[in-house]
Amino acid sequence: MEEDSRNSVLSQLVDSVKAISELPECRNVFRKISGDLVRRVKLLSPLFEELRDGDEAIAEEEMKSLESLRIALDSTMELLNSVNHGSKIYQAFQRDEIANKFGNVTEQIEAALCEIPYKKLAISEEVREQIELVHSQFRRAKERTESLDSQLDVDLFMAQKEDDPDPAILKRLSEKLHLKTINDLKRESVAFHEMVIISDGDPGDSFGNMSSLLKKLMDYVLLENPVNDIPESDKGLVKHRSPVIPDDFRCPISLELMKDPVIVSTGQTYERSCIQKWLEAGHKTCPKTQQTLLHTALTPNYVLKSLIALWCESNGVELPKTRETCRSKKSGSSVSDCDRAAIAVLLEKLTIGDPEQQRAAAGELRLLAKRNADNRVCIAEAGAIPLLVELLSSHDSRTQEHAVTALLNLSINDINKGTIVNAGAIPDIVDVLKNGSMEARENAAATLFSLSVVDENKVAIGAAGAIPALIKLLCEGTPRGKKDAATAIFNLSIYQGNKARAVKAGIVSPLMRLLKDAGGGMVDEALAILAILASHQEGKMAIGQAEPIPVLVEVIRTGSPRNRENAAAVLWSLCTGDLQQLKLAKELGAEEALKELSENGTDRAKRKAGNILELLQRIESDS
């Protein structure tokens, strides 16, 4: 068991350094500090590789220090990932805070290195000298305060203060923030919108300043390069024919210049009318990337819209007109894209109507919210969400069903998620999940799944007692209800604290029943949840007591690629540090199935299969 634990920690350390080393170069104001940190971490690799490949035992004290180092590297990876993505302008405004985070992870690594007694470890003199040198670099980095770019502070201040900043200032900012091209600005626009959505539309007091700066940089880049999308040989012809439309300004569906660009959940931008037709045809994927859309909310891409307007102005192209008023998409349809007057009437009925009127109004809002993205925005802006939350406590079961389903449909819009949670909906939705009709319970489960996409909501939903009620629905719901419950449980269990809640609430037994019932249509969901619970110690113990090895080996032998991958992940967790489970897997013929999986499975499945095969080979050599 100690040997397995040792190898697991060392393998994780090697993998962490490799993952950090392979990160793309940071292209923002943290380029230097990020690059320095990555360079130092890379130099730790020989230590972990030599310890992993050696045969010498490592004492418990040294293992604790290596575990501390593993945790520190996990924090490093998380920070570097966050800095490599996201809005570059936001990061420039938050430089002090982010620089402090770099200081914190540097201190974490240095403190962990202090605990490692190099002289007691079975490593070569050369590696010891290198690690001591790296340690001294981390020590100096910890003690040194990173000097921030004072010129950048001045430029940011002047660019915010002045309506028409000096082009030299905008040039420096464009270069330092790596926002030099239309593509750079397009990516920044997407990142900026995502940041606004994640912060429930309020990313802080500096939002206005950031938005203004982005617009000024946009103007600068386009005016500096007004025709750089036209081939050199054609530049002389610009005045004699229509200019070439930049690819980034064309809708990927229609290939026409966009007039109302919107962003879908994959980050791709389309002309609103084109993507709406695509969605209305029943498609659930992004046309360009073929990725499954997490939701069908369409976020206006105001930055790209401004870029297109500037380009049109610079090239003498008439700006496409957008209709200010919405109209029906289908002839004979009685509902417009956003019929504000009708919505206002329905809200009045929710507020002062009798029970029958409230039920009918909630039902109509439910249908309106399902129909399209514009309605979801309009209904929320009209103030419907708090009124619908109140109706979750209605004694009329049909009204309750309408209210929870309306909230489900509204939650497709990411900004609405925050409004729903802020209206205090989570405890009431959980109450519907526990006590409502079957339809209301199923839609409550789906609503909790939708809300749990936001990480902090995972904590609140788990704390509100949702997990036992979801497990109950998983056992007794309709096929659709079971799937809604399973997806909600899976998403909630990404948060560590909810894994323990799920195990204590008895999740493992029903999951094992679903896993063994191949005709029940829930094998995929059961395995996915088991794989995420197996990474938790209590989950691993509970799964191990449910005699899962025979069915896991069978899935590895005959299941779908994703199920084989998840079954191997669960088996790896169970066999790590448990000789009895490992021997049982061997007796049941796991070795042959794992060898085949290590050759033909997904990348993750190959890794897990290889890890288990290593364990099986060790028990052979020991015996």
Image (tube, grey):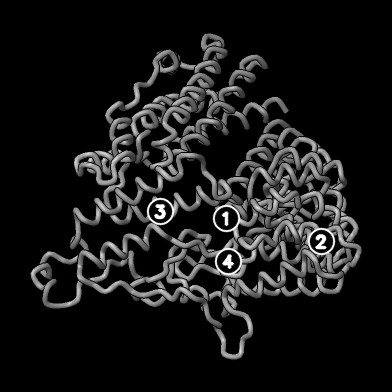
Q: What kind of residue is marked 4?
A: Thr
Side of 413 relative to 541 (left or right): left
- Dot 3 crowding, Cα within 10 Å, few <14, some 14–19, many 20+: many
The residue wearing badge 4 is 296
The residue wearing badge 1 is 602
Q: Secondary structure at mark 2?
A: helix
Q: Residue at x 76, y 52 (%)?
A: 425
Q: Are marks 3 and 1 in contact (CB under 8 Å)?
A: no
Q: Are marks 2 and 4 in contact (CB under 8 Å)?
A: no
Can residue 450 be seen at all in this image of the molecule?
A: yes
Mark before the other along the chain sequence, 2 or 4: 4
The residue wearing badge 3 is 189
Rendering quarter of residue 349: bottom right
Q: Residue at x 72, y 48 (%)?
A: 492
Circle nearer the viewer, 2 or 1: 2
Cα–Cα gap, marks 3 and 1: 34 Å
Q: What kind of residue is marked 1?
A: Thr
Cα–Cα gap, marks 3 and 2: 38 Å
Cα–Cα gap, marks 2 and 4: 25 Å
Q: What kind of residue is marked 2?
A: Leu
